Amino acid sequence: MGKEEKDRNTKEDIIKEDIKKEDNTKETSKGKKLSNERTDASYRGRIYLWSIFGAIILIALDQITKLLITENYKVGEGKSVIKDVFEFQHIRNKGSAWGMFDKTPAVPITIAVIMIGLIIYVYINLLKYKRYRSLRICVVFLLSGAVGNIIDRIRLGSVTDFLYFKLIDFPVFNVADIYVTLSIVVIIFLLIFRYGMKDIDVILGGSVIDKDGKIIEKAKGE
C-alpha cells in the first residue's frame, strides 16, 4: 500500500511539473514551443564565427554599393531606374538616417557608438539561449547597418546615400539603412508574435531561464 501511494505521488509530481512547464511556455512564447536550452561554449564559439562572417559580408555589400555610386556619379548626380518612381541619386548625408541631425554631425556619431555598444550587449544575452536564433540573425543585420554607416562617417565625414523613391519623395537612403530599418521591424514583430514580454527581460539581462524553462529574475551578482 505504501509503495502504491509513493508511485501515485511520484506520478502526480511529474504531471504538476509538466503543467508548470507548459504554462510557462505559453506565457513566454505566445503559444509557440521554444527551446529553453542554454548554449555551451562550443555552440557560442560557432555562432560567433558565423555572425562575424555574416556581418563582414553585409558590411562589404554596403560599402561596395557606396563605392560604385561614388565612382560613377558626382555628388548631386543620379540616374533614373524607373522613370518618376525610383532612381539612383548620389548625396552626402552628414546627419543620421534620412538626413536627421544634418546640422549637428557629432550627434549621429555619438548615437551610432552607443547603439553599437547596446547591440553587442543584447547579442551577448541572446547567445545564452538557443531559442533566440531568429533575434540573433536580426541583430547581426542591425549591427552591420550601424557599422556600415559609421565607417562612412569616420572615413568621409558623411554617409553616402543613393537610393531614392521619387514617386513618394522618400528621403534618400542606402543599403545599411535597409539593414537597420528591416531588422528593427522584424525584431518588433518577433517580440510581439513569437516571444513574450518576459523574454525582453532575459534579452536585456534582467532575468534568466532556469532548467525548468521558467523565466525568473536574475539574482544579484549573477
Image: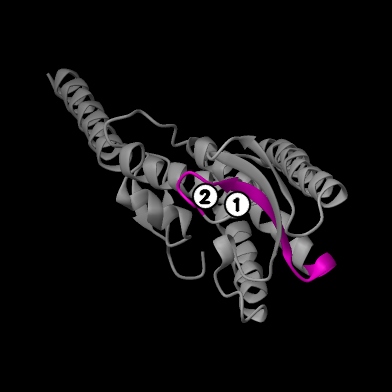
* Amino acid of disc 1: Asp
Q: Label 2 is placed on what type of residue?
A: Thr
Read off the residue under disc 1.
177
Question: Looking at this view, is 63 or 24 the one in front?
Answer: 63
Is 122 placed above or below 80 here? Answer: below
**Residue 124 at least partly seen:** yes
- Residue 204: x and y in percent read 46, 60
Q: Is residue 157 magenta?
A: yes
Instruction: Give the residue number, with chain letter if any, for mark 2.
Output: 181
Q: Please state which of residues 107 and 133 is positioned toward the viewer in this rendering.
A: 107
- Residue 186, position in %: x, y? 45, 41
Side of 12 where 117 appears, left or right: right
Task: Name the residue: 62% across, 70% down.
Answer: 95
Q: Residues within 10 Å of mark 2 (few under 14, many from 20)?
A: some
Q: Would you identify the image quadrant in which residue 106 lies?
A: bottom right
Quadrant of the rendered image containing residue 50: top right
